[in-house]
């Protein structure tokens, strides 16, 4: 059943709805940032737990050849 609202009441309903929507979007944004930061922290922790063999591809120091050259120079 339709109800006639005064202009003030209708404006207040729209303003309240917009405020609630904005608050929800802000919460979603903060939660997304928190999840992103948590995922980064887990990835860094996992990388720190890798041994020298697993981390060779990521390390310029460890990525040097292990064996001597196959042919002797001289």
Image (cartoon, helix red, strand yellow):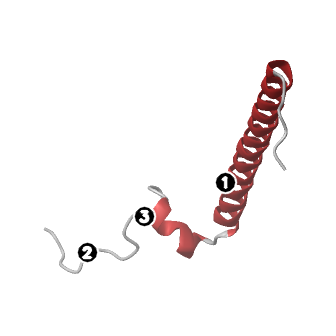
Query: Do we see residue 32 in this rendering?
Result: yes
Which of discs 2 and 1 lies nearer the camera? The answer is: 1
Crowd band around label 2 with a 10 angstrom C-alpha radius: few (<14), some (14–19), many (20+): few
Q: Nearer the viewer, residue 20 or 8?
A: 8
Q: Quadrant of residue 16?
A: top right
Check residue 40 in the rendering and tell me which mark sits there, or answer none: 1
Q: Which residue is mark 3?
A: 63
Q: Quadrant of residue 47?
A: bottom right
Q: Position of residue 20 (x, y in %)?
A: 82, 37
- Per the image, label 3 sits on a secondary structure element best described as loop
Q: Nearer the viewer, residue 27 or 45?
A: 27
- Answer with left or right where residue 4 lies relative to residue 51: right
> Which badge, 1 or 3, comes first in the chain's sequence?
1
Task: Kindly identify the residue that appears in the image at 36 percent across and 77 percent down.
Answer: 67
> Which badge, 2 or 1, comes first in the chain's sequence?
1
Question: Measured along the vertical axis of the image, is residue 31 above or below residue 20?
Answer: below
- Per the image, label 2 sits on a secondary structure element best described as loop
Task: Kindly identify the residue that appears in the image at 48 percent across and 61 percent down.
Answer: 58
Crowd band around label 1 with a 10 angstrom C-alpha radius: few (<14), some (14–19), many (20+): few
Q: Which residue is mark 2?
A: 69
Query: Do we see residue 62 in this rendering?
Result: no
* Residue that extends furthest to the top in the rendered view of this protein: 8
Task: Kindly identify the residue that appears in the image at 84 percent across and 50 percent down.
Answer: 1
Crowd band around label 3 with a 10 angstrom C-alpha radius: few (<14), some (14–19), many (20+): few
Q: Position of residue 59 (x, y in %)?
A: 49, 58
Check residue 12 in the rendering and tell me which mark sits there, or answer none: none
Task: Kindly identify the residue that appears in the image at 84 percent across and 19 percent down.
Answer: 8
Question: Do the residues under discs 2 and 1 have CB atoms within 8 angstroms?
Answer: no
């Amino acid at each position: 059943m339709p109800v006639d609202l005064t202009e003030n009441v209708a404006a207040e309903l729209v303003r309240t709805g917009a405020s609630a929507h904005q608050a929800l979007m802000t919460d979603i944004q903060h939660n997304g940032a928190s999840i992103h930061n948590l995922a980064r922290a887990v990835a860094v922790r996992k990388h720190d737990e890798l041994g020298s063999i697993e981390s060779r591809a990521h390390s310029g120091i460890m990525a040097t050849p292990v064996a001597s050259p196959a042919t002797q120079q001289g």
